[in-house]
Amino acid sequence: MSRRAWLAFASVSVLWGIPYLFIKYAEQGGLTPTTIAWSRVTLAAIILLVLAWRSGTLPALRGRWPWLWAYAFFEIVIPFPMIAVGEQHVASSLTAIIIASVPLIGAVLALRFDPSEKPTAMRAAGLATGFVGVIALVGIDVAGSTEELLGTGAILIAAAGYAIGPMILKQRLRGLNPAALMGAALLVAAVLLTPLAALDLPARFPTAGGVGSIVVLGLLCTALAFVVMTVLIREAGTGRAMVITYVNPVIALALGVALLGEQPGGGAILGLVLILAGSWLSTSGRLPGRRTGARAGAGAGAGSVPPESSAVRAAAFELSPVSPRARTAGEGETEASVARGGNAQP
């Protein structure tokens, strides 16, 4: 990869590895789960919609709004508050490990709802490996605490939302400009979250650290990450961009240990290894291929833009600068894997 691609890869890995930490900071600063979710999506929606408006891509959303509402519900409205709820009871590092199960859930759902996906022995082995990882994580580190079990359940609900969202994106929302798509989805999410946030206002005025955490989550982890992800996909292709799915949990784990003093147990470490291995096997089982010189040249002149919304990682195939007809069969497989892998991004 080029130096620019490596810089974009490192940036996105960090931008989607730090949300768990800042969600925890926001809660410590006095914000409630729904106000955290509402604040960050509203801020990011404004920025991305302005970008889409300036580029003249908003009219393309006509006729897509029902599916945009469905996508926003599963990809943002469910996961964002559920992650914040879960982090009230479990460590940020454990949250990131559980979210790493998104590709596993996506692979299971694809067997039923995506006719293009066929079961294979490798995928079955991956699902079994990942499932054992979840059992190890929950059974060893969480089972003794009712609160942690509830928190884990909330985060697993978020992971399910992250797995469903990309399926809607793949089947119903292809071809839209990413800034317009994600800006509209975030706007819908803000509307849906408004009544919940109004009923769950903070008991006290948030601290400066809490407000600052929202700014980081909205501006950096959602809006800026969206733009940087576009650069990464243009420079390295969707296949290599997908690798961030396996880097983010490790970064989140390291930050939780270093900055919050979290001490993940043996079950969390074992679970992380097994879940990542299972996710990799169940979604592709091979390293992403390299882009050819022709493909790289085709991508250089194209224009698109992208998210955290956890959604961008999941929607990576939509950000590819190469038209569907120009894609090879191998790249199509990789893009389907990205779509199964989800996002997310807290």
Image (cartoon, rainbow, N blue to C red):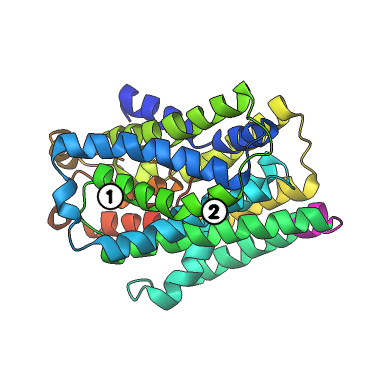
Rounded to the nearest angstrom, the CA distance separating label 1 from label 2 is 23 Å
Q: Give the side of residue 305 with respect to residue 24, left or right.
A: left
Tag of residue 306? none
Query: How many neighbours does mark 2 have within 10 angstroms: few (below 14), some (14-19), or many (20 or more)?
Result: some
Foreground pick, 259 / 328? 259
Q: Position of residue 92 (x, y in %)?
A: 67, 40
Tag of residue 196? 2
Residues in magenta, as a range: 138-145
Residue at left 66%, top 30%? 29
Identified by mark 2, the residue type is Leu
Q: How many marks?
A: 2
Under circle 1, the secondary element is: helix
Under circle 2, the secondary element is: helix
Whether 143 is among the magenta residues is: yes
Residue at left 37%, top 53%? 188
Q: Are marks 1 and 2 in contact (CB under 8 Å)?
A: no
- Marked residue nearer the N-terminal end (1 or 2): 1
Which of labels 1 and 2 is toward the front? 2
Foreground pick, 161 / 240? 161
Q: Position of residue 101 (x, y in %)?
A: 57, 56
Q: Position of residue 237 (x, y in %)?
A: 29, 42
Foreground pick, 266 / 146? 146
Tag of residue 181? 1
Q: Main secondary structure of the magenta part?
A: helix
Name the image quarter holding residue 151: bottom right
Q: Give the side of residue 318 with respect to residue 77, left or right.
A: left
Identified by mark 1, the residue type is Leu
Residue at left 76%, top 41%? 264
Q: Give the side of residue 97 with respect to residue 304, left or right.
A: right
Residue at left 79%, top 54%? 147
